[in-house]
Image (cartoon, rainbow, N blue to C red):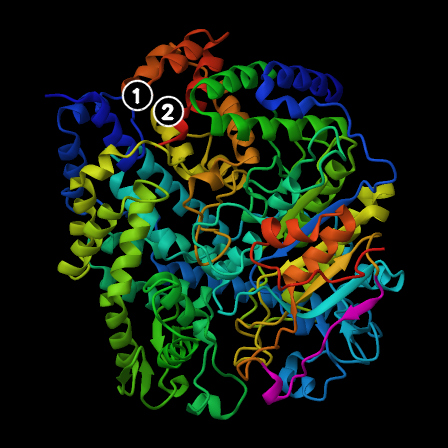
Amino acid sequence: MDPISSCLSRRRLLKGAGALFAWAHAPAFAHAAGARDARFVTIILRGGMDALSAVAPVGDPAYAGLRGPLAMQTAGPGAGLALDGFFALNPAMPNFARLYQAKQAAVVHAVASPYRERSHFDAQDVLESGLAGVDPHAASGWMNRALAALPKGARVAPPSGLAIGATTPLILRGPAQVIGWAPQAVPKASDDLAMRLMKLYQARDPALAEALARGLETDRIASRQGMEMGKPAARGGEPGAMIQSAEGAARLLAAEDGPRIAALAFDGWDTHANEGPISGRLAQLLGGLDGALAALETGLGPHWKDTAVFVVTEFGRTARVNGTLGADHGTGALAFLAGGAIRGGRVIADWPGLSEAQLYEKRDLKPTADLRAVAKGVLADLFGLSAGALADKVFPDSRAVAPMAGLIV
Amino acid sequence: MADPALGYRALTRFGLGPRGDGDLAIAAGDPRGFVRAELSQPGVALLDGPGLMGSVAALKAHFAEQEERKRERERVAAANAAAQPMAQPAMAPPSPAAMPAKEPPKPPSPDQQLYRFEAGARLQRALQARVGFVERLVAFWSNHFAVSVAKGGFVRAVAGAYEREVIRPHALGRFADMLMAVERHPAMQVYLDNSQSVGPDSKAGANRKRGLNENLAREILELHTLGVGGGYSQADVGALARIITGWGHVGPEGRLGEPGTFRFNANAHEPGAQVLLGKTYAQPDVTQGEAAILDLARHPATARFIATKLARHFVADEPPPALVAKLEKTFRDTDGDLRAVSLALVESDAAWSAPPLKMRDPWQFLVAVGRVAGRGFDDVGQMLNWLRLLGMPLWHPPGPNGYSDLAAVWAAPENMKLRLDLAARFAERLRDVGHPSDFLEKAVGPAASQETRLAVAQAESRQQGLALLLLSPEMQRR
């Protein structure tokens, strides 16, 4: 089936699916006069990205000693890319360096979620739920609640979120509409079958009906965006897969009636042993992330100027290299910001220092900023979300955490 | 008196789904007895067969391949050096763009062959099991003690053997035995980096090239035994990490034993007593770690954690507290006898009466489809590919906490759309479907809703009817 006829019939299908999914075929977004039609992408790096290897505080007198063989060099082969006099960027990220020079990328260093233990899974739950602490029953994420809190009247149809991957991460789960997409190589089922199944789900299992409708909705946008379905998964291993995910996200986000916010998650950052920041495993992962940022920039095209990409991880790693040329679970981390909407070209840090007394529990980079402050700052200035909504709904119990100002151009 | 609804539940809540060979009728006669009977078959959890290698043989093949690749790289390097004496090695970050666009097709590596063969054996067992309760338990424990092939060829080569050697023999045995076997197995030692961990004050640590790695110690406490709220501190993580320094596997060179087996390297073991959860462990050798692990297996927080996870897996995302309490008590009263705990689950009324709100995860869904269709997939490669597409690649979870066990995770938009596309493809390629309504009786008969019956009966083709059945809420949930 060619993309155009497939697109048309999917549209018919969704019309047939009933009023419950009326949003799915609503007319194109109408924008309030002068309001920015912004895009917001979060990339979660699961496993705990080593902040001190990604953006190294080469100017800190304790840095080289703590990091030993993992320490980034300032000259010679594999040297870091200088961001300012103090911080150097991992050389596997030339695209980020270019965006930084163009003032479209920034680093927030020594930042953490409110979580202070060292479990990946609890830390990811806190990061994604946006709650002030661990809640094993958390069922929704802050990006979903941000969608739900977008100012009323700005749009004809509620904007939707996009989850990249075979499942929806907690950060995007919740009441607001979320569609899903993953690079895949399976021919599509017929529209007739999909419609019959939708009818059955609507009668018997509304939760599955809603999930299926949102999955089909992505197909429709993807077809119209000319995205090749049935394309085999990328070669080139993990970096290739990261880039392919980002390309797909960008094309869906670029659609006029497509999603406005998206979450991607990249695994594999838990570098306990043989981290390889310059020529090994971490360099490969950072190279993939860098390629993904470039793919978003390219794919979003004219929308890049209104885009903010927020790259986060659940925690940092120990300040000291461990006994196996890696680092164990730590606390303070960093966030990357990129996009034409970012007021970039700077490393934002209230640098805590790396001497023994300055480390958190004499072990980790001490967090001096709250990730929620960064997210709130971006959401406030990009989408005009009110301080009240941000403090009560998007990040509950966060009144004491002021939005970081001036992140958005 | 026969109870078809409970017979169906026996095969879906506890098992891997009906096979359509009259099993629903048999189960209806005595639903609990039907499930219990599988547990009493001798050796029912074990999996063995021609071509299935043990860990030692699998790792020998892996090491030999590594050695061969190393020699090949050296040959190429020597040839390049001879051809271009002036060339300098470039110092550039690895860039995906710089990767060769097309590699010549290579035969699958021994690691990959072993993985596929093991996957095939696991799939066949799941398709053929009478109830599938034991296979569900094996998958549960394998996920509880997850290792991931993302770690590389070593874990890929041995992932199947790991499950057969340390999970299956103890799935109906003692938890402490499974825990000990898991933590000693090379797959776990390598996956969570403990093979490399060295006591800072040990002989090997004295030269300062290597030191402590706390990855495995943390996950033993957080994921394998006490659970994250189980009352341990960062100090306990450090203590356990030091206690199990020296634990690891024997590498290809065969120092300290046969390659691919567990080793205890006294030179890498941190000397001295350690305090874990308030108790002092003063043993000077491998028995220090063994004693600590046995205590963790018997810790009350472990019983609670395991009981909660089991009830959540089989019954409900928010399991009935009375059921959790019952499993916890059984675990404690029997010193972690997993047969007794599994039977307690089967005996519980709450486990049978809870509504079917859990989603079949991709493995359970595809196996259920294969069972009722009476034939499997084109080959194991297709099954592995579909598992990957659905977000559950075999022995390849996103992290050491394994795959999600929550219904909402698997009922995601992209997952439902993929299930639709895959079920359609599966149905289209089954030539001789028979009558879809007969299929329905075999697959979900006692549970079939009027709407599902109608949708299947009114389908425009047999294939479409079958696809609708495979996608029906009755087949998706359990």
Quarter assignment of residue A32: top right
SS at mark 1 in the image = helix
Q: Quadrant of the C terminus of chain B?
A: top left
| Chain part drawn in magenta | A344-359
- What is the CA distance from the residue labelled 1 to the residue labelled 2? 7 Å
Kindly identify which chain the residue marked by label 2 belongs to: B
**Residue sitting at 71 percent across and 23 percent down?**
A26
Question: In the figure, is residue B416 to the left or right of B364?
Answer: right
Quarter assignment of residue B474: top left
SS at mark 2 in the image = helix
Q: Residues within 10 Å of mark 2 (few under 14, many from 20)?
A: many
Residue A354 among magenta residues: yes
Q: In terms of sequence position, does the residue under pointer 1 or pointer 2 come before the other? A: 1
Above or below, B414 relative to B271: above
Q: Residues within 10 Å of mark 1 (few under 14, many from 20)?
A: some
- Residue topped by disc 2: B474
**Residue sitting at 61 percent across and 61 percent down?**
A313
Residue A5 or residue B118, whichever sits in front = A5
Above or below, B288 relative to B442: below
